[in-house]
Amino acid sequence: MKKYFVFLVILAIFSACSSRNAGNVETGPERVAIAYIFRFDSEVPIDPTYITHFNYAFGHVNNEFNGVRINSEDNLRLVASLKEQKPELKVLISIGGWGSGRFSEMAADETLRLAFAADCKRVIDQFNLDGIDLDWEYPTQTAGGLISASPDDTENFNLLCRDIRNAIGDDMLLTFASAASARYVDWGTAMKYLDFVNIMAYDMENKRQGESPLHQAGLHRSQWTHGNFSVEESVIAHIEAGIPPEKLVLGVPMGGRGLVRGARFSNAHEQEGYTVQWDDVAKASWLSDAEGNFMQTFECPRAIAYKCEFLLSKGLLGAMYWQYSGDDTGLLRKAVYEGVMQIKND
């Protein structure tokens, strides 16, 4: 009997190990680790190991205002094909982006809006996708560049979400990339149609010309957080706007911003004449010059770990990041996944 019990234990361990797909990691709770993928860099191969969702950037409202134009259909097919390697992976197309227009005109016209929604369904079916991520930056605003806007955009955005949801059905995902301020959207209505919201809680330094850079995504407000939001304030703004925390996904930057060109986590310690610093209030890394001036902001695994602890404490769904190719080591996306899924390394 004892030998039989030992045999069953060994068999169970073997079965658990062999059932994992090659290239995958053990899954944790039903949280999300979302990667926006934009540039295809041969030096940063696409690896879905630490990713639950890929958001392919970008699709756009076409010139006729009635359908979707896609940046490189071949690249979209390549990303969607990763589901053959990792069947549980979700792939969405993100429509919009900074400076991507024609949303206002399309959403204001019922005929165009319905045609656009139908084309979203066509794209999902044609490319074997799992949903649509809307990245209209931003309803009622022309901040994204030479794009149109209208005071009616907020209401028309609700109609657009409704029509896309009706077109793609309840089994497909419909998500939205939100401004850090949580402005421009009637969340009480929009959340009837959206599965979750990706908070773009980065690029928030908002420096004026001639000013030194500041933290792009400091978790808490510190002396290096001026103007806009800290990550904490951004999340609170979304919750206070009425979005359930379990439908919020915290955005994380992968690169750096500032005056030291090309400096980021992978090469920060190699920047001659600059010193890596840690802001223990903001929980963020930065580079200083010889005089101690703030010169560059960049994300690091330590900062990501703090963000993951914070988002879990607030009951958020998970994290996303812009963008995949900004992490040339793989350590940042691993930190996101392990932090969100609460995976501890021995």
Image (cartoon, grey):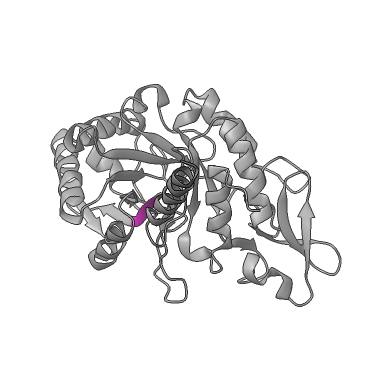
At 54% from the left edge and 36% from the top edge, which residue is drawn?
Answer: 181
User: Can you tell which quarter of the image residue 112 is in?
Assistant: top left
Q: Where is residue 319 in the image (x, y as percent from the top left)?
A: 51, 44
Q: Where is residue 86 in the image (x, y as percent from the top left)?
A: 34, 56
Residue farthest toward the right in the current orientation of the protein: 291
Residue 155 visible to an observer of this rendering: yes
Residue 264 visible to an observer of this rendering: no
Q: Is the magenta stretch mostly helix, strand or loop?
A: strand
Q: Where is residue 251 in the image (x, y as percent from the top left)?
A: 52, 46
Horizontal arrangement in the rendering, residue 81 relative to residue 309 (left or right): left
**Count of numbered badges drawn on the protein:** 0
Horizontal arrangement in the rendering, residue 248 relative to residue 81 (left or right): right
The verdict on residue 96 being magenta is no
Horizontal arrangement in the rendering, residue 314 relative to residue 97 (left or right): right
Above or below 98: residue 188: above
Q: Where is residue 32 in the image (x, y as percent from the top left)?
A: 45, 43
Horizontal arrangement in the rendering, residue 309 relative to residue 292 (left or right): left
Above or below 126: residue 110: above
Above or below 303: residue 293: below
Q: Which of 307 and 109 is in front in this view?
A: 307
At 41% from the left edge and 50% from the top edge, which residue is drawn?
Answer: 11
Residue farthest toward the front in the current orientation of the protein: 1
At 29% from the left edge and 56% from the top edge, which residue is drawn?
Answer: 83
Stretch in magenta: 53-57
